[in-house]
């Protein structure tokens, strides 16, 4: 691993984690078992002629199957970091490698392929398609992804079952509760068998009890698959669901 990577190593704190059994990730990379490596990542936005520094030379590694909590106050750069790790935004400077793929210089088109194949997203405001049912919201991923037809339907049904949503499969988002919508969003993020799932404040719109249920579910779904996750939050109660917590303040990570 890169020697400049002081923030977080792939060496995971506990040995009882499932190791990823994805044979592909190690083969494609010189990064061994890393789900994510960010090196010297800087991101600035231009706002009314002024430069806003959202991320300031961030070094971060997430191991395969590791659940990382990124904890920080509003405006600290959490969403920006998630967006860059997920290929939604490009860094101004620095290097980004996800599951062994160096996406630093990817074109828009390559990033779009990368997003549909390699990562999953669950946002704070659940972005379900309002006119599609729960099941169709899972299947829509597949229009872009690797499965199609029967295999996709079967995967969607398995995921809905795991998420205890089978009896709501035909409901529209407007007919579901907040927690149920978040379950559909989790299912959708897993449809493409991602290496890394990015959760941006996944419980902030839920009450405490529902938030805990959703976090239990996220944790067990990630563990079961050996899928790595970054869970972004300003709520320090979330840290107990993670293998490791990294703090972010003013675009800088703690060492
Ligand atoms: P967080 O998710 O932790 O609340 P963000 O990543 O959304 O933080 O934002 C980090 C900083 O970058 C904030 O100061 C925010 O105002 C600024 N910022 C975010 N997006 C933009 C944008 N599109 N244009 C200008 N500034 C932005
Ligand atoms: Mg945010």
Image (cartoon, helix red, strand yellow):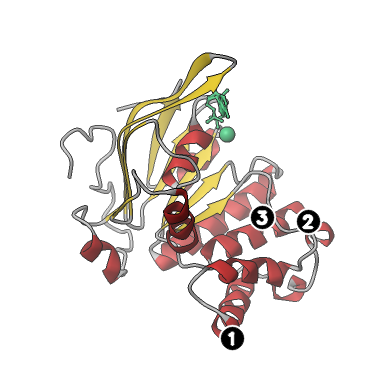
Instruction: Say if 5 sits above or below 185 in the image.
Output: above
The residue beneath circle 2 is 177
In terms of image quarters, where does ligand 2 lie?
top right
In the depicted structure, whether residue 116 falls above or below residue 47: below
Which residue position holds label 3? 182
Say whether disc 3 or disc 1 marks the residue closer to the N-terminus: 1
Work out whether residue 157 or residue 49 is closer to the camera in this orientation and state it. Answer: 49
Alpha-carbon span between mark 2 and mark 1: 28 Å
Left or right, 141 with reference to 117: right
Tell me the residue at 27%/70% (across/down).
23
Ligand 2 within 8 Å of the CB at mark 1: no
Name the residue: 22% across, 57% down: 29
- Residue assigned mark 1: 150
How far apart are labels 3 and 1 at the CA level?
25 Å
Report the residue at 55% width, 60% height from top.
Answer: 189
Pick the residue in front: 147 or 105.
105
For residue 222, which quarter of the picture?
bottom left
Whole-percent x, y for residue 184 in the image:
66, 62
Residue 73 in picture, x, y percent from top left:
54, 25
Tag 1 or tag 2, which sits nearer the N-term?
1
Front: mark 3 or 1: 1
Q: Counting other residues with Cα less than 10 Å from the Cα at mark 3, is it few (<14), some (14-19), or many (20 or more)?
A: many
| Residue at the far bottom in the pictured view | 150
Relative placement, left or right, of 12 versus 194 is: left
Residues under labels 3 and 2: Cα distance?
9 Å
Q: Is residue 114 left or right of residue 124?
A: left
**Is the distance from the Cβ of mark 3 to the nearest ligand 2 atom less than 8 Å?**
no
Q: Residues within 10 Å of mark 1 (few under 14, many from 20)?
A: few
């Amino acid at each position: 691993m890169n020697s400049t990577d002081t923030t977080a190593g792939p060496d995971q704190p506990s040995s009882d984690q499932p190791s990823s059994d994805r044979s592909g990730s190690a083969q494609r990379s010189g990064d061994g078992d890393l789900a994510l490596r960010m090196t010297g990542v800087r991101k600035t936005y231009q706002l009314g002629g002024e430069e806003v520094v959202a991320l300031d030379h961030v070094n971060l590694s997430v191991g395969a199957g590791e659940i990382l909590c990124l904890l920080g106050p509003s405006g600290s750069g959490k969403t920006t970091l998630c967006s860059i790790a997920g290929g939604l935004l490009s860094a101004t400077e620095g290097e980004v490698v996800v599951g062994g793929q160096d996406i630093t210089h990817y074109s828009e088109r390559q990033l779009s392929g990368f997003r549909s194949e390699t990562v999953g997203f669950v946002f704070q405001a659940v972005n379900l398609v309002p006119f599609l049912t729960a099941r169709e919201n899972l299947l829509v991923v597949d229009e872009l992804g690797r499965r199609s037809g029967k295999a996709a339907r079967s995967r969607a049904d398995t995921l809905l079952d795991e998420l205890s949503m089978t009896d709501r499969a035909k409901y529209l988002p407007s007919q579901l509760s907040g927690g149920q919508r978040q379950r559909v969003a989790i299912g959708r993020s897993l449809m493409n068998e991602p290496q890394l799932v990015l959760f941006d404040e996944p419980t902030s719109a839920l009450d405490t009890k529902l938030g805990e249920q959703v976090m239990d579910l996220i944790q067990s779904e990630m563990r079961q698959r050996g899928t790595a996750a970054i869970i972004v939050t300003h709520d320090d109660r979330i840290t107990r669901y993670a293998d490791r917590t990294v703090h972010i303040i003013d675009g800088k990570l703690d060492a």
